[in-house]
Amino acid sequence: MSLTIHQSGIDAAISAQASGFSGAQLQWVDLYNGANKIKRLPLNGVQVIEPGRIYVVGIDSEPGAYDVTRMEFITSTDQPFATAQHSDGTIIQSKGASATLMLAHQLNISSAPGTVAPSGDVSLYAPQATEAMLGTAEIATQEEVNSGSDHTRTVTPKTLKSRLASFVRSASETGTGFIELASQGEVDSGSDHSRAVTPKTLKAWLENRLSSATASASTTTPANSLAVKTVMEAATRQATEAQRGQLEIATQSEAASKTNHTRALTPKRLWEILTQFATRGEAHFVGQIVYSSKETPEPGFFALDGSTIPNGVVDYPELASSGSRWITVSGNNIVLKDAVDFIRGQGSSGRAVGSFESDAIRNITGTLTSAHSGGAIAPRPLHSLLDAGNDMWFGATLFDASRVVPTADENRPKSLTALICIYHGVI
């Protein structure tokens, strides 16, 4: 590859005995493919190796593919310094679409003008490493690792270990953290307060205590036998108001029955019961019928929609035994009435509560006076179409109530629809 030094470059350079440029420096390199200028790259790391030998580096890490057949080195005063190219105009260097182009050239302008040779005693400048491209990276300091805000430097094992150590702490009575499992010997001694007991070591400790107490009772005084009995009873006895012991958690139906005094309510069950009491505006008795203006029933109520409550006798014993005529007990299920009709008061009518009556209206009668063939005028019922005997009636009568009043497939007054519910009690 030949190097042509331009007059403007000679004017900008100093003699071979000097140590650099005077008033100008190399700053750019223009890349060409034939007569087509591809782009201008800034020169990095311009170094004077010795008087007359200059090392330059140019980097292009942007996407794009091209071939370079000529390079023009430009001074800071925008003057052409030198041109590098093959004598036959062939390609000097190529760049792939996702590759990084690195030009590292030594311009020898003293001992052998017109030549370009690579240098073996210079520093190369690689591109900065990113998530999308290989390159060089700087090692982060401990402060940069601790802050966690830098995204351009690398973490070493030492700085990572130091950072992770700040997150590792032992568990205590006042804070969460890592905890070590106690050995069987530490559990048996009962003196360690920094390790955790597993079910296995606890079981072994209890069995050891019970077996030791039993063996001692068989060879020693009655007092030891009493001690063994006391230990065994304490491990199995039922809790009461007067003594400590084991306690069973109440089921949903037991909590609702309000009669059990040997089982405990969990915080969740207690909260549900208190919440339902608080959301009810007034007290209700099981089996009471209420009207609701909401689409769904309030807690403690069932909508009377004809549905079946599976296992309702067990889950809602008070409702099942309430005697309400609005429910039917079928085996272990509770079947609710379908309250889609108007509710009517019993009063002194003698009707049974919960009984159903079909619709009906009062009878309507009337007469129509018309002429007949005998010349006489006589009243006739509306439903009479043909008189007995020899009389002949003329004409027809049509009766249609819809021409006067609204009609439907049922008899009803004006009404508003509400959700009719039955109270089943607090669960």
Image (spheres, helix red, strand yellow):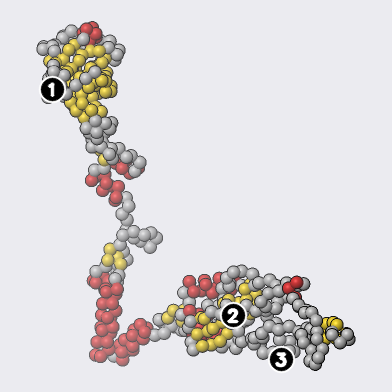
Q: Amino acid at mark 1?
A: Pro
Query: Which residue corresponds to mark 2?
Result: 338
Counting from the top left corner in percent of width and height, residue 13 is at 21, 10
Q: Which residue sits at x=85%, y=82%?
A: 370
Disc 2 from disc 1: Cα separation: 99 Å
Front residue of 294 and 377: 377
Mark before the other along the chain sequence, 3 or 1: 1
Callouts 2 and 1 close, C-beta under 8 Å: no
Q: Which residue sits at x=79%, y=92%?
A: 388
> Residue pushed farthest left?
112
Callouts 2 and 3 close, C-beta under 8 Å: no
Counting from the top left corner in percent of width and height, residue 270 is at 51, 74
Query: Which residue corresponds to mark 1?
Result: 118
What is the number of the mark on residue 128? Answer: none
Counting from the top left corner in percent of width and height, residue 312 is at 50, 83
Mark before the other along the chain sequence, 2 or 3: 2
Mark before the other along the chain sequence, 2 or 1: 1
Q: Residues within 10 Å of mark 1 (few under 14, many from 20)?
A: few
Disc 2 from disc 3: Cα separation: 22 Å
Q: Which residue sits at x=26%, y=20%?
A: 37
Query: Which residue corresponds to mark 3?
Result: 350
- In the image, is 302 to the left or to the right of 214? right
Q: Which residue sits at x=54%, y=74%?
A: 273
416 in relation to 324, above or below: above
Q: Residues within 10 Å of mark 3 (few under 14, many from 20)?
A: few
Residue 57 appears in the figure? no
Give the position of the N terminus as an image quadrant: top left
Q: Secondary structure at mark 2?
A: loop
